[in-house]
Amino acid sequence: MKDLFANAFEGQTVLVTGHTGFKGSWLSTWLVELGANVIGFSLDEAPTNPSNYVVSNLAGHITDVRGDIRDLEAVQDTIATHRPTIIFHLAAQPIVFRSLAEPKLTFDTNATGTVNVLEAVRQTNSVKSIVCVTTDKVYANQEWVWGYRESDPLGDYDPYSASKAMAELVVASYRESYFAKKNYDKHGVAIATVRAGNVIGGGDFADYRLVPDCMAALMAGEPIRIRNPFSVRPWVHVLEPISGYMWVAVKLLKEGASFSEAWNFGPLEQKGVTAGDLAERLIALWGSGSWIHTNPELEKSETGHLRLSWDKAATRLDWRPAYNWEKALSEIVGWYKLLQSSADMFQANRAHIQTYVDHARAARIGWTR
């Protein structure tokens, strides 16, 4: 597998903030497979209980550093000590409902945390490639049936969306003020932001997220409770955007500032999939179960749309998804069945990554060559 991504990660020191989280743990596992020296930086407390990080024993395969992304000194010390070449910044408060209850925590973590990472980078000469992970929810909600493009207006009303849009502005400010494209030959630092849709996959145990809610109910033999079965979301398997994040990091490392901008990564489906359809497919794959609508007064006409256009990534990165939504859900159900059987989940995660790579290679996607 080390021949992927132009062999760019082998032997590199890579810092992953938020490595204990859902996406961070999958990213860290894949980087280990690619021969990287992975440094993880996360809070002491686990983001969820259980978590993919814990059940896969990822701590035994990386350097685990504990600290708060809101603590500038801790971030500076970590970067100065380990001197990474590449940074993936994923540490965040990622839950919309929690952002409504704890807005200051959300803004401090998502916006100021991004400031801290970039401010720390200013104090070192080791970092060359930075990928800051935001979200599809950075876009101002227009209820469009077509996908949002990277050039569309940012900013929605809830604290989570607003804080992530602020993180995008932070990156743009630092990029223009300290790491300008025109001065790349002098500073040698390239920074991109990456935005993905509703990311799903094995190992997600977060509250207020549809797939974890579905899988918890199915494993407990209880009905799945769905708030809005008519909502349409760009459900995308976790390994899809991660492959995009890594390919952007490689482009930044090898080709510099010409890729130092925002990138969308979305699913194969152009129409999106409703929450109700997703739940029904999970039930069929699991082999039993049911779902109930917890907000039946909601009219079908109130459907919420949120989709991303990944045309730019397809055109300029030669990136595209490998899984359709049914294949993504099949992989997810398989992961949770392995968990129930007390399998070695680090090896299970390696196998899931290999399966995804095989599909991507069959589709002749750019990063596989």
Image (spheres, rainbow, N blue to C red):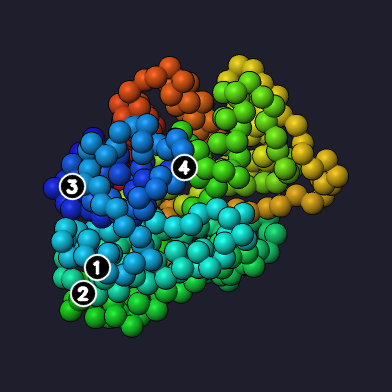
Q: Position of residue 333 (x, y in %)?
A: 51, 26
What is the CA distance from the residue labelled 4 to the residue labelled 1? 26 Å
Alpha-carbon span between mark 2 and mark 3: 21 Å
- Marks 1/2: CA distance? 8 Å
Which-is-in-front pick, marks 4 and 2? 4
Write down the quadrant of residue 156 in the picture.
Answer: bottom right
**Residue position for label 3:** 37
**Which residue corresponds to the image point at 18% horizontal and 71% vertical from the top-left?**
124
| Element type at mark 2 | loop
Crowding around mark 3 (Cα neighbors within 10 Å: few <14, some 14 to 19, many 20+) is many
Residue 121 shows in this picture? yes
The residue tagged 4 is: 48
- Which mark is on residue 123? 2
Q: Is residue 286 above or below residue 11?
A: above
Mark with earlier residue (4, 1): 4
Q: Residue furthest bottom?
A: 177
Query: In which quarter of the view is residue 294 placed?
Result: top right
- N-terminal label among 2 and 3: 3
Q: Is residue 174 above or below residue 201?
A: below
Which mark is first along the chain, 2 or 4?
4
Instruction: Give the labeled residue for mark 1.
Output: 76
**Which amino acid is tagged 1?**
Gln
Placement of the N terminus among the 4 image quadrants: top left
User: Between disc 3 and disc 4, whose residue precedes?
Assistant: 3
